[in-house]
Image (cartoon, rainbow, N blue to C red):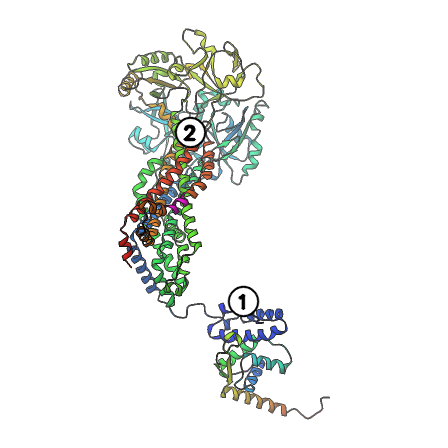
Amino acid sequence: MSNQSLGEFEELVLLMVAALHDEAYGVSILENLEGKLGKKLNISAVHVALKRLEDKGFVKSRFGGITNDRGGRRKKFYVITALGKRMLDDQYALRTAIYQQIPKISFG
Amino acid sequence: MKRYPPQRPLKFLRWFCREDYLEEIEGDLVEVFEKQSVVSLRRARRVFTWSVLRYFRPRFMKTFRSLYPTNVMSILRHNLLITLRSFARHKSSFLINLTGLSTGLACVLLIYLWVNDELQVDQFHENKARIYKVLENRIQADRIWTSETSSGPTADALAADMPEVEYAVTTTRNDVHTLSVDEHPLKATGRYAGKDYFNVFTFTLLHGRRNELLKEKNNMVVSESLARKLFNRADETVLGKIVEMDHARQYTVSGIFRDLPYQATEKADFIRSFEEFRADHPDWVSTWFSTGAATYVMLKEGTDVNALNAKIAGFVKQKTNGEVTHRTMFLKLYTDKYLHGQFENGVESGGRITYVKLFSVIATFILIIACINFMNLSTARASRRLKEIGIKKAIGAKRNTLVWQHLGESMLLSLISMVIALGLVIVLLPYFNILTEKQLTLPVTLAFAERVFGVVIFTGLLAGSYPALYLSGFNPAAILKGKLTSALGELWVRQGLVVFQFTCSVVFIVAVIVVYRQTEYIQSRSLGYTKDNMIVFEREGNAAETTDLESFLAAVRDVPGVHNASSIAHSLTGHNSGTSGVVWEGKDPNDRTEFENVAVSYDMLETLGIQIVDGRSFAREFPSDTAHIIFNEAAIAFMGLKDPIGKVIKLWGEDMEIVGVAKNFHFESLHENVRPLFFRINPENTGRIMVKIEPGQEQATIRRLEKLYETYNPGFIFDFRFLDDDYQSQYRAEQRVAVLSRYFAGLAILISCLGLFGLTAFTLERREKEIGIRKVLGSGELRIVLLLSRDFTKMVLLSIALALPLSYFLTSSWLKTFAFRIDLSAAYFLLAGVIALAITWITVGAQALRAARLNPAQALKRE
């Protein structure tokens, strides 16, 4: 699974897609990430990450219905795939495992 | 309030972004924009633009190639089929376009060949970039006169004093002589030339040693064709053979050169050594005070000619110890002389290049006129092809596919026209060659083919680009609903193009009228002497002996049918020989104005019919007439003499008494004013015999003269010309312009009319119903014809208004080159306007009448 690597920002986006389950589209992901990270992001960065994730098979997408918002343009919603979820789980497990190896000493 | 994102970045995004991503990206961008714009519109717009730019990366770009593989071959085949069908269906416009374009292209080809040939003249000399002719600017009382002659010692002095000069040669003018080998006389033209002549100019030497050609005084280098005529062969056995000249001198052939290409300006059948000329005229060759020789120099590689010109400007003054101050020497590139050989007041003022440019412009305009026909007919007939375009667009044809289809159509037409034009050129070239006195051929080279192809593409683009863009720009929905109303702008373009065509045509008509009138004026202007029925031939053989001249002339006068005869030094067709050696009382000592010097025998003035306004002509009854002189009126006026008869002036230091004043006559072309001139009796120097014969029996008289000549001058050939022909040859350029402009004007008008014809036919077809209804309601035929002609009349009137000032400017600047010219009268312009209008009315009126006569029921029942 050498090509199945995940960049830091990609991981954040993937997490957010999973978290927003079924309500994840470009702008909602952007706003939530901005809220969590506390800094401004550009929408294009989110799109780049989403397209990469889709190529890798971690997310899949579908168009929403036509509304009067956004000048009549449809939203594209993303959901996490089983593969994406496993990837997140693996990452989480890996990090947790290493984290727990940190000796219990004070970092004060 | 609804806020919109900036449009330009949005358009840019839509242009580059791949379609499957576009909706999502655009939507998200707009949503972000809308949210941000609540806070700050400017910031939101800035962020929007910046974001769009950040999408400009390969991942988001569409592939600009078409998504679906297109079958190029089948599209081409389809387009070709459609094109051929439309040609076949609209035969009249196809034929009009074909005629117009092919004649236009034929013009372009012919003029291209001619211009190309003009540019090739003298270019065959290998050292052309380094060969210069020595010219002199001479200050005269009223102008600076640029002369192509220089003094005898010029060449040797330049070679000795100027290290930049590699070779310098002197040549004389060409003379006609009788050459003979074993009593077979023939006439040939040749000149003297300095020993390095063959090093400077490129001659292909067939036999002989290049450096020893003019070594001996009696050497003669002959052309291949002359060698064949003299010896029936041109191989090395000819070398060393003896040729007799004028049955007096003998020469040894030292070399044979291949005949010069016809693009050489200075041709000669034979070349003699200048050393012989030097031996014959030792004084003339060594003096700086008279001029007459032509001097050529070849400079060393890398010489700055401007610097050298500055160095030699005072050369004549320096060589004469400051005595001659009015002559400034300068070098002129030899190959430039042909096209840029005209000087006015010492400054270069064009020459043949004017005509080269003029005809290039005319050819371009004729081609444009033909292209306009195509544009107008295609856009006018657009309605017929609307459905085709609409359906193609509706089923997904891109605009550029349609553009290419229509451009392809015009290219194909232009290609067919070119093939016809090439055929036309092949047919017309012999006539064109006679007209232009050239030997043009269609070159069969790749370079020429490339150029022809280039012209085809250019014509196709010129004719086709506007219709292609116009036709492909329609909105398919509107077309298919039949809602197309022709835009006002498009009508303007079409009318503007017609106006342009007719403006050109009217300018051409005016030019033709003016050129025709001026050439007619040249023919008919009284010159002050009679050139008709005047025979000219060279004085040679026994007649060349001064003692025998009088008896020969007397014998000529006795020939039945001869009116009078005498001999003269002057050709009467241009400047021959001038002198500043006339001194009169009150002359400004610095004045160097040259008087034309005409040596004559007795009776010459009478033979020519030159009028004496004061005093008398030369007469044998006055034996001292060799010390007498006759001036023309211009000379008397220039000298400011009152009561000139009996006054004494000095000519070259000797006293001469003025015995008569001749009325001004034109001894130069009508481009020039009549300049000061004098006659003196000096039979030795008269090289030409002029014989005035009675009109009506020229042939018989000439035969009798020939017989007399041959008994008097055994071994010489009676080779005569008519003075009138010599006179005409001065205006060859003008006559050529006259004839060519007539053809070109005819063509321009013809092509314009074809276009107008096509447009009218189309308009009438569209207005068929309107005419029918008008007739039903009681309109008369005349009214309908007037109604239909009105639009076209307006256009042509506008063209006339535009063309008149333009043509006035053009023709008056052409006429300015003549000192004697017709006045531009309003009648010429009026005539041109009337012709243009008449042609329009005939073209339009005939068709309009036919349409007006049609039974209205016919027009109305068709649906």
Mark 1 = which residue?
A: B7
Mark 2 = which residue?
A: B214
Q: Considering the numbered disc 1 on the image, is that residue within a helix, a strand or a loop?
A: helix
Q: CA distance from mark 2 to mark 1?
A: 85 Å
Could you tell me residue B458's position as x and y percent? 40, 51
Main SS of residues in magenta: helix
Could you tell me residue B465's position as x and y percent? 41, 55
Viewer-proximal residue among B547 and B430: B430
Q: Which quadrant: the C terminus of chain B?
A: bottom left
Which subunit holds the residue at mark 2? B
Q: Which quadrant: the N terminus of chain B?
A: bottom right
Magenta range:
B789-796
At x 31%, y 15%, the residue is B562
Q: How many marks?
A: 2
Q: Which image quadrant for residue B233?
A: top left
Using the image, determine if residue B489 lies above or below residue B273: below
Which subunit holds the residue at mark 1? B
